[in-house]
Image (cartoon, rainbow, N blue to C red):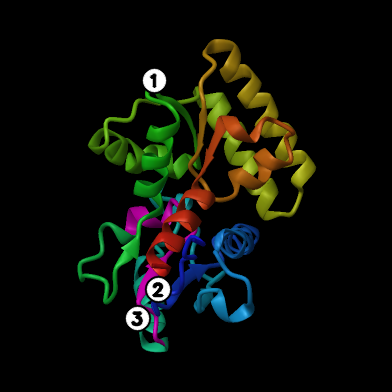
Amino acid sequence: MLEKRPIKNGKKLGVIGGMGSAASAEFLRILAAKAPALSDQEHPVVYMIADSDLPDRSTAILGKGPSPAENLYLDFIKLAAMGADIFAVPCNTAHYFIDRFAEPLPKPLIHIVEETVLAAQKLSKEGVWMLSTLGTVQSGLYQDYAQKHNLILHLPNAKQRQLIQQSIDEVKANNMPVAGNLVKQVVEELWLEQEMPLMLACTEIPLGYAASGLPQEKAVSSLQALAEACIRELYK
């Protein structure tokens, strides 16, 4: 007897992208690759607002720029009006502001930080190195969710965190070879100190990591974790 394939459950996905553009495009690619679809009609319906005008999230957390919170919330309202049943935001740092909205979201959110922490916990019970933006580290966003799910986080030192932030900026500027070299430099230093899996807690870092030539099986991608969670919500 043939195993029954999952089918769409009718839910429509609303995505706020543009933070950054390459990461959003990669999220949609992974979503399409993960979908149990054999035709266009079997892929999920996705509404996306690529809002590249949103102020930089890390800069806002560090107190050096305006908050994106108001415009982020308005984008959720627009997606709900378009017909979205569930939301996803392929930007980790944005969730610092989303978690602090004064008003509830009109539809459920698939939370990239929580999904990434859960995926990392499955990969390594001994803990992970966390690579992220400077803003995400300072916000304590991942530290809070890691504590909730009993995941041990190890943080790079200050110089290494700066290099990872630089690699993120290089991805946003479409300089993948430079981004890859920066990621490789930091990761090789971390593995000399303690060899454990990596949690790529910024949606640009999986692109830099892919360009580094480092083994994919030793990293948990926040983009991958979010896409897989979306598929679980969109199919039955």
Q: Residues within 10 Å of mark 1 (few under 14, many from 20)?
A: few
Q: Separation of disc 1 and disc 3 at Cα?
A: 40 Å
Element type at marker 3? helix
Near-viewer residue (47 or 232) = 232
Q: Which residue is mark 1?
A: 126
Near-viewer residue (202 or 32) = 32
- Decide which of tag 2 and tag 1 comes sooner along the chain: 2
Q: Residue at x 74, y 41 (%)?
A: 211
Which marked residue is nearer to the observer: mark 1 or mark 3? 1
Q: Which residue is mark 2?
A: 71
Is residue 45 one of those drawn in magenta? no
Q: Which residues are magenta?
A: 83-97
Q: Mark yes or no: residue 76 visible.
A: yes
The x and y percentages for residue 56 are: 50, 58
Near-viewer residue (97 or 47) = 47
Image quarter (top left, top right, bottom left or bottom right) of the C terminus: bottom left
Q: Is residue 7 left or right of residue 39?
A: left
Residues tagged 1 and 3 counted as in contact (Cβ below 8 A)? no
Q: Is residue 177 left or right of residue 45?
A: right
Q: Which residue is mark 3?
A: 77
What is the three-letter code of the residue carrying label 2?
Answer: Asn
What is the three-letter code of the residue carrying label 3?
Answer: Ile
Position of residue 41 relative to residue 123, above or below, is below
Q: Mark yes or no: residue 91 visible.
A: no
Q: Residue at x 68, y 49 (%)?
A: 171
The x and y percentages for residue 75 are: 41, 76
Q: How many numbered circles are shown?
A: 3
Which marked residue is nearer to the observer: mark 2 or mark 1? 1
Element type at marker 1? loop
